[in-house]
């Protein structure tokens, strides 16, 4: 389907350029119409060309068809190349910015001599643009906002942000529950990728409902711009610059469409090859016999994969990283799931830098259905995080003892923990004698993020009281890269000492590759939310998704242990290092 998209984009761009050049409005409208038709088609344009049907599409005239044929043959359209040469490249790019149209750029070009992106941004910020006729306060604000959005939209969002938006949109779409049969978040969000480019929503419904569904979709409160509104496909940009796509398919196509739009692209390419080798054809519309084009299935994902002789790989591992071979052999491993999770090992309260009280955080953990939670406030050297000194920890323990009395009857356990700072030399911010009194100790680095910190982490792992290394790589989603580390060394020492490594939901720290290394070496990981407010605890399932991307097995995820198992894990290390 991507050729349709590519060609549509070129027609759109040609229309922009013609508008910039002040060309004939009729011709501009023609190009825009062709772009819309192409991106709306649910057939591959190449097939339309093969069958000759391309000549009979209302709205696509002879000269447009020629351009399409030229693109399919040569990979470019000479008319477009010709037009591009007439506009500075930077200005072409600026045409993609919301609220900056070709007309605005034309004025800026003619009256202010603006030739580059920087020229334009400077003219906006210096107020020079405001001297143009018709450029009032309101219009300028819109342009500024457009630039902000455009800059932001070039970033990817974190999994948590994407999930929040996706969930809100799903709830909104469910107002139409009478018109919709199935609805699901697809794309990288369903695969629980740590960053998400845009959010993909898939709906199955009888065809006669589609217009209403797309109408409702683009009417969402947070929509800033409607990029595309059609019968099968719509696309919007929200106020916060995030893009959401909607696809509608017929109920019998659900499984094939969900499989296709979940991706990843690399996974899909391999799966299609497997279909081909079996004399089948797989598309977002179903599984077909290659010779007769007869539809043979595709109403559920399981059906699609079964027709190809495969198990259904969980969405999180559909990256063509070994899952396809195992699925063909029927040997996919059973991955950890949210239902297996019995507790959270890293949460904060307002005793340090959290905003929930101890009572609120514990009650929320209990309501998650857990068996235990580790309260892990920061130690003293984390001054910005209002770290606790020994005296304050002791006061907190008294509170915990009091609360434990209430929760014991409910079968819920509060573990006295801390997130102790690993200092620059690798020593810890609390003496061993105090660490020994905690039920569970998380040790983390919060300083010197640019140096190689392997030695600090190794030294912390050697401490008999440290059970978990917090956010080991120092990475934070796309935004912070993390410090250089010898992960192999760390994983080996963690294994030899019985220390776990943390998969931190809030930072997506421990990459899928790291998790796979841990699994291969038999090292435990602990999935934590690092909650700083009661509402954060609910993101555990996203952490589980991140762990599944690394093929995490329940038997090596610390959270699957019950309270007894956790206590044994702590004691085992102390015994191993001969301190008890
Ligand atoms: P993102 O949005 O960059 O985080 O990543 P995705 O995976 O959500 O990608 P997106 O939104 O462009 O497309 C959603 C899914 O649709 C993608 O995972 C697989 C499928 N898809 C899109 N384009 C192609 C394509 O050209 N070929 C194949 N086989 N699948 C595609
Ligand atoms: Ca996407
Ligand atoms: Ca998309
Ligand atoms: Zn923390």
Image (tube, rainbow, N blue to C red):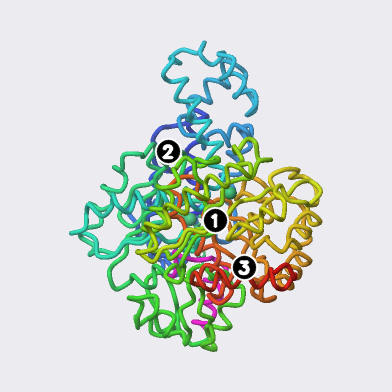
- Asked if labels 2 and 3 touch by Cβ distance under 8 angstroms, the answer is no
246 vs 481, left or right, is left
Residue at 51%, 13% (x, y): give it. 130
Q: Position of residue 160 (x, y in %)?
A: 48, 51
**Label 2: which secondary element:** helix
338 vs 206, left or right, is right
Which residue in the protein does label 2 denote? 27
Camera-side residue of 413 and 199: 413
How far apart are labels 1 and 2 at the CA level? 72 Å
Q: In this picture, is 105 found above or below 574?
A: above
Residue at 39%, 75% (x, y): give it. 301
Who comes first in sequence, dot 1 or dot 2?
Answer: 2
* Residues shaded magenta: 259-276
Camera-side residue of 116 and 321: 321
Label placed on residue 570: 3
Camera-side residue of 356 and 7: 356
Residue 322 occupies quadrant:
bottom right
Question: What's the magenta bit mostly, secondary-structure-wise?
Answer: helix
Q: Residues within 10 Å of mark 3 (few under 14, many from 20)?
A: many
Q: In this picture, is 137 found above or below 567?
A: above
How far apart are labels 3 and 2 at the CA level? 74 Å
Which residue in the protein does label 1 denote? 416
Label placed on residue 181: none
The answer to whether the residue bearing label 3 lies less than 8 angstroms from the nearest atom of ligand 4 is no
């Amino acid at each position: 389907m991507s050729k349709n998209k590519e060609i549509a984009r070129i027609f759109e761009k040609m229309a922009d350029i013609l508008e910039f050049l002040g060309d004939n409005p009729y011709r501009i409208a023609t190009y825009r119409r062709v772009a819309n038709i192409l991106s709306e088609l649910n057939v591959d344009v190449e097939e339309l060309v093969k069958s000759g049907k391309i000549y009979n599409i209302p709205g696509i005239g002879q000269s447009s068809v020629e351009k399409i044929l030229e693109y399919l043959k040569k990979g470019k359209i000479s008319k477009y190349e010709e037009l591009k040469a007439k506009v500075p490249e930077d200005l072409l790019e600026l045409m993609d910015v919301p609220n900056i149209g070709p007309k605005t750029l034309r004025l800026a070009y003619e009256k202010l001599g603006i030739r580059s992106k920087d020229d334009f941004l400077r003219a906006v910020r210096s107020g020079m643009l405001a001297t143009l006729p018709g450029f009032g306060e309101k219009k300028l604000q819109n342009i500024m906002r457009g630039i902000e959005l455009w800059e932001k939209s070039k970033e990817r969002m974190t999994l948590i942000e994407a999930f929040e938006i996706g969930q809100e949109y799903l709830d909104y779409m469910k107002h139409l529950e009478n018109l919709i049969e199935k609805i699901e978040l697809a794309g990288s969000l369903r695969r629980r990728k740590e960053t998400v480019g845009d959010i993909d929503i898939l709906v199955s419904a009888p065809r006669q409902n589609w217009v209403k569904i797309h109408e409702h979709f683009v009417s969402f409160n947070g929509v800033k711009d409607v990029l595309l509104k059609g019968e099968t496909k719509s696309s919007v940009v929200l106020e916060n610059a995030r893009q959401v796509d909607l696809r509608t398919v017929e109920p019998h196509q659900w499984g094939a469409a969900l499989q296709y739009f979940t991706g990843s692209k690399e996974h899909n390419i391999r799966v299609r090859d497997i279909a081909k080798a079996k004399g089948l054809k797989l598309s977002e519309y179903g599984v077909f016999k290659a010779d007769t084009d007869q539809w043979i299935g595709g109403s559920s994902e399981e059906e699609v994969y079964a027709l190809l002789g495969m198990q259904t790989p969980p969405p999180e591992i559909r990256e063509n990283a070994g899952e396809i071979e195992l699925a063909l052999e029927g040997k996919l491993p059973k991955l950890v799931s949210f239902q297996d999770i019995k507790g959270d090992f890293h949460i904060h309260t307002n005793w340090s830098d959290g905003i929930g009280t101890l009572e609120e955080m514990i009650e929320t953990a209990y309501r998650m259905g857990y068996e235990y939670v580790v309260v892990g406030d920061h130690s003293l050297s984390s001054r910005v995080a209002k770290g606790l000194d020994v005296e304050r920890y002791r006061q907190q323990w008294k509170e915990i003892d009091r609360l434990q009395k209430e929760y014991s009857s409910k079968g819920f356990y509060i573990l006295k923990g801390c997130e102790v700072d690993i200092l620059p030399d690798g020593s810890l911010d609390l003496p061993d004698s105090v660490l020994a009194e905690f039920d569970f100790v998380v040790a983390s680095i919060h300083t010197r993020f640019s140096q190689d910190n392997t030695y600090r982490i190794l030294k912390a792992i050697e401490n008999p009281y440290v059970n978990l290394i917090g956010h080991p790589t120092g990475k934070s989603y796309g935004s912070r890269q993390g410090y250089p580390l010898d992960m192999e060394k760390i994983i080996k020492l963690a294994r030899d000492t019985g220390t776990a490594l943390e998969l931190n939901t809030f930072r997506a720290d421990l990459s899928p590759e790291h998790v796979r290394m841990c699994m291969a070496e038999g090292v435990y990981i602990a999935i934590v939310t690092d909650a700083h407010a009661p509402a954060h605890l609910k993101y555990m399932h996203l952490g589980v998704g991140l762990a599944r991307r690394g093929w995490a097995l329940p038997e090596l995820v610390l959270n699957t242990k019950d309270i007894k198992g956790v206590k044994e894990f702590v004691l085992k290390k102390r015994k191993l290092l001969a301190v008890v």
